[in-house]
Image (spheres, rainbow, N blue to C red):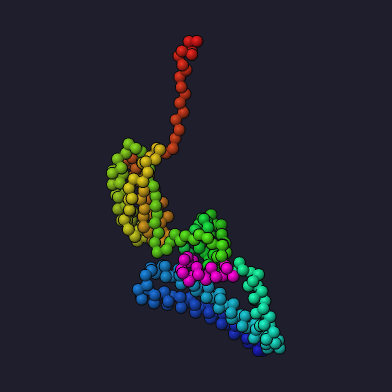
Amino acid sequence: LFRRLFILLVAAIAVRTVNGVVPRMRAGVVRRMAAGGANATMAELEKRARTISGIVRKSAGVAIWVVAVMMSLREIGFDLGPILAGAGIAGLAIGFGAQNLVRDVISGFFILLENQVRVNDIAVVNGTSGLVEEINLRTIMLRGLDGTVHIFPNGTITTLSNMTMGYSYYVFDVGVAYKEDTDRVVDVLRQLDEEMRADERFRTIILEPLEILGVDQLADSAVILKARYKTEPIQQFNVGREMNRRIKKKFDALGIEIPFPHMSVYFGEADRKSTRL
């Protein structure tokens, strides 16, 4: 009994040690990778290290407890040979019967190995977007803007888009009336861009000046100009919303018309000839 209790106590201490050591090792690895000239920002390195460290802690914890339980069984007097042999046969049978599970684990391994997505990234998985809250060998968990948690088995992922790998873009369309001078509108946008980059709230998260791609469409009721901002990861929405707010206020102040879809209803006059009849 003393030996069994000692084994379980050592296992618990080992798990706590792993949970304490791995985060410290993660910070050290991030610093060494950054000092070694890794082609990524500190935030990117931290996200990747956090994702991998989470998998390592969980895997190490499971392995420690499995070994501890097996050692405790041996102390009780169980013969582990038949148990291991039976576990091998059961594992083989489960492998054939649970092909989807094996597929999920293999897919998750390659997602981590290839650094396709990390915790705290914004990703689009099978058409569903959200913040990556957790990555496991079997599943990936996204939290949508409305708080809904979406869980996808890794083997079922057919499309995966990472919106925050290295940097982000906010792409927006600016629609003005046909009577407006597009060159003047471009000058106003550049002036707003200078004001945005001079603002302390956005100076550090905007990586490049506003890129105005030009007149993108001649739509039914508006001329559409397309532009985009290059920002730090996940900051594109804050920058884009603020820029849209400033565009609306500036256009109102300068009298630049922002058209909107509308419908004209025409009530025709009665035919005079038919009226006479």
Total numbered badges shown on the rendered structure: 0
Q: Position of residue 216 (x, y in %)?
A: 36, 46
- 13 sits to left or right of 178: right
The residue that appears at 28% across and 43% down in the rendered structure is 184
Tell me which corner region of the image, top left, top right, bottom left or bottom right, holds residue 261: top left
Whether 143 is among the magenta residues is no
Task: Please check the rendered image and state whether residue 113 is part of the magenta-colored stretch, yes or no.
Answer: yes
| Viewer-side residue, 76 vs 15 | 76
Front one among 185 and 104: 104
In this view of the protein, can residue 229 be seen by the observer? Answer: yes
Which residue is outermost to the top? Answer: 277
Which portion, as a residue range, is magenta? 102-119
| Residue at screen point 56% across, 79% down | 15
Q: Is residue 76 visible?
A: no
- 147 or 158: nearer the viewer: 158
Magenta stretch, overall SS: helix
Say which quarter of the image contains residue 82: bottom right
Residue 113 location (% of width, % of height):
48, 71
Q: Residue lying farthest right? A: 77
> Which residue is at a point 50% across and 57% down the rendered structure image?
129
Q: Residue at position x 39%, y 56% from top?
A: 169
**Picture layout, residue 154 above or below residue 249:** below
The quadrant in which residue 262 appears is: top left
Q: Quadrant of the N terminus?
A: bottom right
Q: What percent of the width, then of the height, locates residue 242?
A: 39, 51
List x then y, in percent, for residue 227: 35, 50
